[in-house]
Image: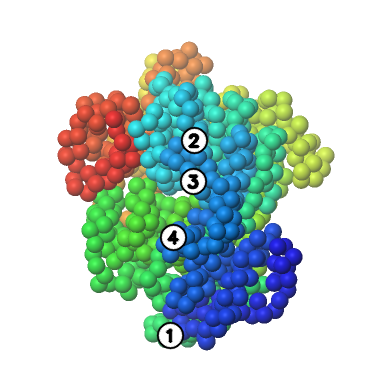
Amino acid sequence: MQELADRIWANKAFHRASRKLHRNWLARDIGLPPNTLLPLKDVTRLVEASAALALSSNAAHRIAAYRAATEAYELHGESQLPFAPALRVVLGRLGNFPAMHTRSAVAESREHLPLSLVAEELDLADRRTISLPEGEMLLTEFQHGLWSRLDAGESAAVAAPTSAGKSFVLQAFLRKLFQTPGPCIAVYLVPTRALITQVSHDLRPAYAGRDVQIATVPIEAGAMLPERAVFVMTQERVQALLNAHPRLVPATVVVDEAHGIAEGSRGVLLQGVLERLIGRNPDVQVLFASPGVRNLDVFGRTLALPNVVPLRSTEPTVGQNFLIARVVDPEEGLTTVRAIGMHNNPLGLGEVLIGRRCVTRVEKLANLTHALGRGAVNVVYANGAAEAEDVAVRLATLLRGRDRTAPREALARMAVDAVHPDYVLTQCVLEGVAFHYSNMPAQLRLAIEQAVVEGHVDHLVCTSTMLQGVNLPAKNIFMYRPEKGQNTPLDSVDFWNLAGRAGRLLREFHGNVILVDYDDWSRKPLASAREADVVPAFESGVARQTAKLLEIVTRSGNRTKSDANLEAVFVKMLGQHRAGSLRDALEALSRQHDLDTTTVGALTAAMNRAAGAITLPQAVLRRSPDISPHRQQILYEVLARRIRHTPNRLGGLILRHPHEEGAYESYSEALRLCHRVILGMKPESRFHRFLALVALWWMKGRPLPRIVQNQINRNPDGDRRRVIRDTLEFVEREVRFQCVRLLGCYQAILTQALVGHGAAELAAGMPEIPLFLEVGASTRTAMSLISLGVGRPYAIRLAAAAPSTLLDIAATKAWLSSDPAALARLPAGARAEVDSALARLVLR
């Protein structure tokens, strides 16, 4: 069959016919007139050729087989020839069994196949079927290969396109992991809070009514750890969990978006957290999942895991097409459309006259999406939150007059409850348009994602949150000079990661990536490799930024601002020095990155001097891994001096519980000190007072709409949309990140100073301020509700009706199951959202 496939591939007639079929399918898909259709005999020969190419070991052959067979079926259907059973044969030979259910005619066509082909399919399917608690499941060839490795207990590093279904297999494996009774702990590491919400939402139904806890919030020190749990958390939350519970030992660790190990201080932290998890159980099974990683051996090498199996797939379960839309008359919106065909050959599709001006970025993205994406689910990539809102507003205007359905009205009410009545999203969603960016409340983002999945929102404008694993495939993705960060074009790996979300498995066979004015892009990702080497942030900091790192370690140069990424490298190197492993680590880096002996000597000498000046234990420094050890040492000396000089006023240094008198003053003073010592802010700055006030509101559960309204009142003449957006950013950046970072550092160092002074009892009673800040609640009951999947606004309201503020997760579930009237006290929209979360738990 391979010889036959090679002969077909060498036949120019096959490529001519395939190209013409592809052009006609694309034109129809975006609403352009087709060329003359292929004669039916040529279409038939293409499908016959696809059946042979599908058995080839050559990936290009298999992709061409999928494309030709699916396009032939969609263009010609069942009207003249039985293309549905023919497509079923091709999909079966490709091992893409899930795609058979994209169209009912294909799913039900096996009875029309000859017995020999039925037997072939059954044999192929039998080899790719697995058993799960919920029944048998048929996987793709790649998915089954991954499953086999996991089921054998092996650690694996997986690189596959977004639509390859790797997350589906990982989550199915976790379900099977808990089939047998007995203690079992799994850690599911994700890079963002948005993914915490999505992954926990996906996992909960499988464990409903069972004795497995899905935990998303770190469990406080002293509280009982569940025996059977999946901890779905970012590396920051896992670090807090490990600090609070030295006896937590994982059996399995899943690292989603594992290429994050290369991303600055968070990459260094991810590496450190993984080292701690592996250190607690050297036999732990670790699963690394990521798109576009070329050097899959990097994870095992970096973490000293000798038997990590590399697995790679280049075949998505859904095809992707790349179209270039060039605006040739900006005033009238006349646009030419061409496709990038096989071997990057251009394929002209025709012209579209939009009839509206297409000059600005917003005009081009909105108008072209409206013109080319009709009747489909569309994702538009925007460069930043402000642009996302602008594009969404323009799209909503173009779509004005659509039915305002009950689900859209419910989503609009949720936006009011979660953010503010004037939030522009509330009007957009009524027209089936939404936007999605990192500073939005997590539950609102999840509700938007669900609305897209369920078809209530069909135009979604996203920022780089789409690159961080949020699983929102759509039929079409529109991009125009996409950036990640300030004026930084998307690199090739991020581009291909985003493009891989075009096309939804079980809904369509292909997705389209529409690139607007691609010829004007400064970076041409289509010409770039889909994969890249991952260099861990720690290695990169040592080997590629040695001069800057030496300045930070030696406190030389004129560096008024710290560099969090290199400070994290410094903290880790100091730990290696104290453990006696620094020289070995540097020698390993020398082999990997060609560090010369002079550089190694300079780093070693600098670390020797730094270790002599810094007396704080490594366990304390590690709690604030992106803050300079030198500055942490200064903060320690300041606090130790105050403790010595005012021993009768030690209580004034303790951060109070948010509901305790004097809480604001304690936060204000701690932040003032941290701003001056850690951030180097001027002494006359009063920012700490405002930040302390908002942080207090946030921890006490003040609704975000009230915080937003306070900012609107302070800026009555400001642009309302910008004030709301800036407030969301302030809460995320300053309260939920910077405050967590600074006050967490303050508490860790104050604890060390108090213990050294013989006042350990005061240190033991400190409230979990960093946890309260990140979650936005400060009663155990509210935090339990949030960990169960209830959104913060409704968790705060529901917790107010609880019999106690001290309910843990188990007690909270018991209360809700015994007191359903508590839900009746919530507004109707809130009840629906909470009911949805609780339904996934099946309370007993």
Which callout, 3 or 1, points to the residue nearer the camera? 3
Which SS class for mark 2?
A: helix
Which SS class for mark 3?
A: strand
Q: Which mark is residue 137?
A: 3
Look at 74% across and 65% down and name the residue there: 3
Q: Type of residue at label 1?
A: Leu
Check disc 1 and report the residue beneath it: 353
Mark 4 crowdedness (10 Å alpha carbons): few <14, some 14-19, many ≥20:
some
CA–CA distance in space, label 4 to label 3: 17 Å
Q: Which mark is residue 176?
A: 2
Earlier-in-chain disc, 2 versus 3: 3
Check disc 4 and report the residue beneath it: 108
Q: Position of residue 92 (x, y in %)?
A: 56, 58
Earlier-in-chain disc, 2 versus 4: 4
Earlier-in-chain disc, 4 versus 3: 4
Quadrant that contains the N terminus: bottom right
